[in-house]
Image (spheres, rainbow, N blue to C red):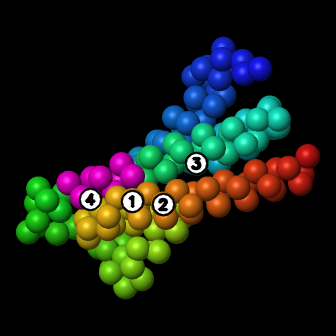
């Protein structure tokens, strides 16, 4: 049976992991891997739930960057992206196309890739699928590695 009191604790558990994962995948600095690994150590039987929560939170955070890029392109179409990382990310999206979003989980370049994808007009459904898949694979590797250590 699912224990809602532990799952709704903001000091940890799935809700805390979701919030950490979401914030870590925005333009704000932060990382969620340590929280996921700690939660897995505390609750190894919840590996699938924790993997799903981290993936969902991180994917939604990436989509928030996509949405910012989409909005900026429509609100300020003549201004362009000013930040060097964002301009480089836009060049990568133009060069490699939508599949580059599989790498949105990477530190430093992942958030700008999501923003650049929104700016350049990558549609929401393909962006969601590719961002989510990349993040699910990253967290899956962490969960698998933690399982092989335990």
Decide whether the magenta segment is chiefly helix, strand or loop. helix
Residue at screen point 48% across, 60% down: 129
3 or 1: mark nearer the eye? 1
Q: Is residue 121 above or below residue 65?
A: below
Q: Residues within 10 Å of mark 3 (few under 14, many from 20)?
A: many
Magenta residues span 63-71
Residue 69: x, y in percent? Answer: 26, 59
Asked whether the viewer can see residue 141, the reply is: yes
- Pick whichever, 144 or 25, lies toward us: 144
Q: Are marks 1 and 2 in contact (CB under 8 Å)?
A: yes
The residue that mark 2 highlights is 129
Q: Secondary structure at mark 2?
A: helix
Distance, label 4 to label 2, CA atoms, is 17 Å
4 or 2: mark nearer the eye? 2
Residue at screen point 67% across, 45% down: 51
Q: Is residue 96 above or below residue 127?
A: below
Residue 117: x, y in percent? Answer: 33, 67
The residue that mark 4 highlights is 69
Q: Earlier in the sequence, mark 2 or mark 3?
A: 3
For residue 84, what is the image quadrant?
bottom left
Distance, label 3 to label 1, CA atoms, is 16 Å
């Amino acid at each position: 049976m699912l224990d809602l009191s532990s799952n709704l604790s903001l000091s940890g558990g799935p809700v805390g992991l979701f919030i950490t994962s979401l914030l870590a995948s925005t333009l704000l600095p932060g990382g969620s891997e340590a929280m996921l690994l700690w939660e897995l150590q505390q609750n190894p039987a919840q590996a699938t739930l924790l993997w799903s929560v981290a993936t969902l939170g991180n994917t939604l955070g990436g989509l928030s960057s996509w949405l910012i890029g989409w909005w900026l392109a429509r609100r300020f179409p003549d201004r362009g992206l000013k930040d060097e990382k964002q301009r480089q990310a836009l060049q990568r999206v133009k060069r490699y196309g939508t599949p580059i979003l599989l790498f949105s989980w990477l530190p430093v370049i992942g958030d700008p890739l999501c923003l650049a994808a929104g700016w350049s007009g990558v549609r929401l459904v393909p962006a969601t699928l590719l961002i989510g898949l990349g993040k699910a694979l990253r967290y899956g590797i962490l969960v698998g590695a933690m399982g092989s250590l335990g």
